[in-house]
Amino acid sequence: MTGAGGFIGHHLVSYLKRQGHWVRGVDLKLPEFSSTEADDFALLDLRRWENCLRATEGVEEVYALAADMGGMGFISAHHAQILHSNTLINFHTIEAARLNGVKRYLYTSSACVYPEYRQNETAVTPLREEDVYPAQPQDAYGWEKLLTERLCIHYREDYGLETRIVRFHNIFGPLGTWDGGREKAPAAMCRKVAIAKLSGNHEIEIWGDGEQTRSFCYIDDCVVGIYRLMRSDFREPLNLGQDRLISINQLADLVASIAGIRITKKHVVGPQGVRGRNSDNNRLRAVLGWEPQISLEEGLGRTYAWIEEMVQRKGVARARTAA
Ligand code: NAD
């Protein structure tokens, strides 16, 4: 598995071990917050071809999660770096997997592939897999995902490599990046609320007017969905997310109620991404006979508890300046 030192990869390694698999994790770094359960862990830079050959040697299946990525703050400010790094990683990894005789290959795409023109309103129509064309992803991050999706489809058609493509919609949970600039909205919100609670200053900064909408999916559902897709016969891209739409303002209120405090929101200038985005789960239900089960309240409860502990450990003053 590539990206095994990252948020989803680390959880997926543990899940695959529970299913009885032998797992090699590959990443630039070890998981930050708890030790890996992988049988073998190689620290490799997958932008380099020879490292991709080593990473995929002797395995039957590849879960390709490695990516240079982060939340809106990161994605909207590093287009060249993201497109360059992620193209190198993904183009080398799939070719190395083919040469090493890998049987099945899962590529982790994103809701960021969907065209900007379908996401201009807060009360957005949920995105069906076929809505992706005509293509107009908002950021270079989404363009690379779309191109690698095409590459996976062609590798299956031309070389017989069984590829699976999953499009995640905002996955969140404990053991993910929660500060430093690469964190995503749910983790950032939990951190801001935890700092507010522990410091007594209940003012929270929100990027934009906070009316932008999203859906959020808890990590335990994500790894189950990935595994089900990998075992299925379905070869086209598939959404994996929740289909409950909420605004960033509502997300802030929900986290505050979990923390047991009242907050005041200060709306500041900041990157907001598309105006609204939701997952259409009809194909997910039909293909996997399943959909995410864990409610936003339950998932955020577990995530908030972990992030509050992280803020306490780091100290409120340091957590505030690191954000
Ligand atoms: P993450 O940043 O926590 O994990 C990605 C991992 O890739 C990191 O540990 C990073 O060190 C590693 N990596 C980056 N460059 C590398 C390189 N050159 N060589 C080797 N490893 C490298 O992100 P995540 O949330 O766990 O995301 C996993 C995958 O899912 C990514 O492909 C991401 O684009 C995709 N995705 C995630 C979400 C989400 O909501 N988290 C949404 C859509 C798509």
Image (cartoon, rainbow, N blue to C red):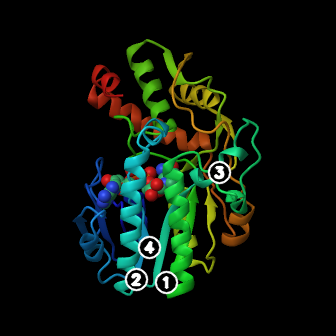
Q: Is residue 184 above or below residue 196?
A: below
| Residue type at tag 2 | Arg
Looking at the rendered structure, the secondary structure element under dot 2 is helix
Q: Which disc, if any, is residue 19?
A: 4
Q: Residue at x 59, y 54 (%)?
A: 113
- Measured from the top left, where is residue 244 in percent x and y? 69, 45
Q: Residue furthest left?
A: 43
| Residue type at tag 4 | Gln
Pointer 1 residue: 161
Q: Residue at x 58, y 24 (%)?
A: 208
Residue 246 location, quadrant: top right
Of callouts 1 and 4, the N-terminal one: 4
**Mark 4 lies within 8 Å of ligand 1 (Cβ measured):** no
Rendered-image quarter of ligand 1: bottom left
Pointer 2 residue: 98
Pointer 3 residue: 242
Residue 218 visible in the displayed image: yes
Badge 4 crowding class, 10 Å Cα cut-off, few under 14, some 14 to 19, many 20 or more, is few
- Measured from the top left, where is residue 23 in percent x and y? 33, 73
- Measured from the top left, where is residue 256 in percent x and y? 55, 25
Q: Is residue 114 left or right of residue 59?
A: right
Of callouts 2 and 4, the N-terminal one: 4
Residues tagged 1 and 4 counted as in contact (Cβ below 8 A): no
